[in-house]
Amino acid sequence: MSRPEVRLVVLYEDRVHDSFLRRFFKKHPGHGRVRFEKCVDSSGVLKRLGAEVDALRSQKHPRNLGLVVVIDADEKGLTRRLDELTARVDADTRGGARSPDERIAFVVPALEIETWYVHLCAPSARPVDETRDYKTSPAWRELERDLGAASRRAVDAWPPAPDRQDPPSLSAAREELKRVD
């Protein structure tokens, strides 16, 4: 018996997220149709979160629907940003906190998604420091020149590799995405 197709809504911040996410979900097509919602920045993602969770919960067949929330940790760090997302769902939705079986994934690159690009695409820059801003680094500037190619390389390098120590936020994101499989 085949699994029902999962349809996703993906909330995210900006063009760098957009480039990665579109390639990621194209390469991992088992999620069915994907609706991408650019929210401009982290505050936009947080503002949309409650409404999207309520919409997901209001559907007749929520087992084949999912929500992926992609928001940079910024200066808050991974744990505080995850706590913030959890608290927002609890406070801003009719159904309260996210339950373990809900298809709602919180993907939080730390410090920002540029850190993941540098880690996944520039082996000489490893190990990356998730508290460092890589937006001004030579490695990121080179990758940003052709963001499409960098996104393809990052998505291709997404799976864990035995010879590579991944940053905690990347490993946590992989676990979170299992919620919408």
Image (cartoon, rainbow, N blue to C red):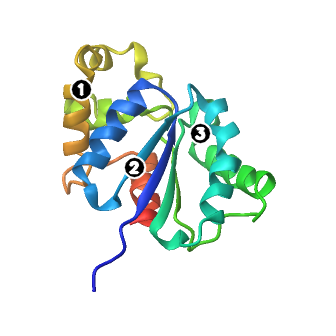
Q: Nearer the viewer, residue 76 or 104?
A: 104
Q: Circle 1 sits on which residue?
A: 148
| On screen, residue 180 above or below 67 | below
Q: Residue at x 27, y 40 (%)?
A: 23
Q: Residue at x 61, y 32 (%)?
A: 42
Q: Circle 2 sits on which residue?
A: 34
How far is disc 3 from disc 2 in space, using C-alphas? 28 Å
Q: Circle 3 sits on which residue?
A: 77
Q: Residues within 10 Å of mark 2 (few under 14, many from 20)?
A: some
Q: Nearer the viewer, residue 97 or 50?
A: 50
Helix or strand or loop: what does disc 3 sit on?
Answer: helix
Which disc number belongs to residue 166? none
The quarter of the image holding the C terminus is: bottom left
Helix or strand or loop: what does disc 1 sit on?
Answer: helix
Helix or strand or loop: what does disc 2 sit on?
Answer: strand
Which mark is nearer the camera, 1 or 2?
Answer: 2
Q: Position of residue 27 (x, y in %)?
A: 22, 49
Q: Residues within 10 Å of mark 1 (few under 14, many from 20)?
A: some
Residue kind at label 3, given as amino acid type: Gly
Q: Residue at x 29, y 62 (%)?
A: 30
